[in-house]
Image (spheres, rainbow, N blue to C red):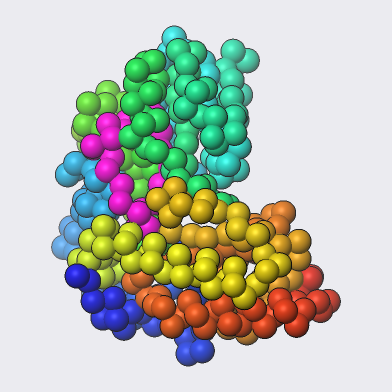
Amino acid sequence: MTDFAATKALFALPEGVLYLDGNSLGPLPAAVPDRIDAMLREEWGQMLITGWNQAGWMEMPMRLGDRIGRLIGAEPGQVAVGDTLSIKVYQALAAALDLRPDRKVVLSDTGNFPSDLYIAQGLLKMLGPDYELRLVAPEEVEAAITDEIAVTLITEVDYRSGRLHDMAALTRKAHEVGAVTVWDLAHSAGAIPVDLAGAGADFAVGCTYKYLNGGPGAPAFIYVAPRHAGRALPALSGWLGHEAPFAFDLDYRAGAGVERMRVGTPPVIQMAALDCALDIWEMTTMEQVRARSITLSELFIAEVEAACPGLTLASPRDPQARGSQVSFRFDEGYAAMQALIARGVIGDFRAPDIMRFGFTPLYLDEDDVRGAVAILAEILNDKLWDRAEYKARKAVT
């Protein structure tokens, strides 16, 4: 079994802080500053531009892709890292639509992250008035997958409630009616076991700054199933997705496989941080992380419901039906979260009334959970949240 005390020791957690927001931004792995310093001084500083060859910068997107691929059940060589999640959603959705030119409907759900929906809206508007983004309630997705659907665009774990979609079942249903699947793994990668190959997923995208602890602004990743990799077109085609980037052809020729989904110059400093952060994942398996996260989240729910009667569980009661986060509803949830943060318990808030808490076994344990609930109960029961400074909305909630 994983020694989670050993993994916790590998993070630079601030003294006196209980961090329950790794579902939004992972904390700093303690080894990252030295790794970045070495990259800056020994690679960029000494190698200069030759670092692209000598230090292997150009190969980082695919090398890191394989490291992430191990955590999401991808076949080797089918994941590329780089750019932002928004760009990767755009590429995956455009490529998926191109595989079904006879259909015009993209299906998503009202629990999807709004940015995914904005990207779909923008792309479909450019493609013409015949295209439609169809939204249904999360629990209605399977029934809504009909032979009208070109692409399903689904985030596996609902960012607010933590509700977990059944990837295998929805992918199977989509394929039965001839649709193509795009899965957003923003709240899945590093949180729950994912089996892209086993589920038969067509495309998947995700970010690395949440459970993978790559740091703020860490690059995204994209997966393309082997059966599509040689013919999927990226739509947003950049020079590093070209068959021969340094031939400097004036016309685009798609590179081999998923490498064609590369767009711009790799963010090497950020990738060095991510590479270092991924070392911690060599100490565990997703199955062990999942089992431990369920233990922690179940403890949290039980403790909160015993000590904080004013909160209402917004996440599925069944731990197998949710990701690695727990959400509670509270009318004054924003103010209560600000009061919590002021006391050193960091979660986050999602409108209109969701208090959201992430459970990452790599650096959280039972004592952390009980300590967080004790402070939460004090804030709620004594109405310590009822102060003007806690109600003033900040730019990031």
Viewport quadrant of the C terminus: bottom right
229 and 251: which one is in front? 229
214 and 387: which one is in front? 387
Q: Residue at x 33, y 66 (%)?
A: 292
Residue placed furthest toward the top: 102
Q: Is residue 186 magenta?
A: yes
Residue 83 locus on image (x, y percent): 41, 49
- Tag count in the figure? 0
Give the vertical position of 222 relative to 344 (above or below). Answer: above
129 and 307: which one is in front? 307
Q: Residue at x 71, y 67 (%)?
A: 310
Residue 10 location, quadrant? bottom left
Residue 194 locus on image (x, y percent): 31, 47
Please provide the residue range marked out in magenta.
Answer: 180-202
Q: Is residue 141 magenta?
A: no
Residue 287 locus on image (x, y percent): 26, 57
Residue placed furthest toward the bottom: 15
Give the vertical position of 283 relative to 326 (above or below). Answer: below
Task: Please name the predominant secondary structure of the magenta segment in the image.
Answer: loop
Residue placed furthest toward the right: 388
In this picture, residue 307 sits left or right of residue 163: right
Q: Is residue 63 visible?
A: yes
In this picture, residue 39 sits left or right of residue 186: left
Give the vertical position of 129 relative to 376 (above or below). Answer: above
Q: Residue at x 40, y 47 (%)?
A: 185
Q: Is residue 236 visible?
A: no
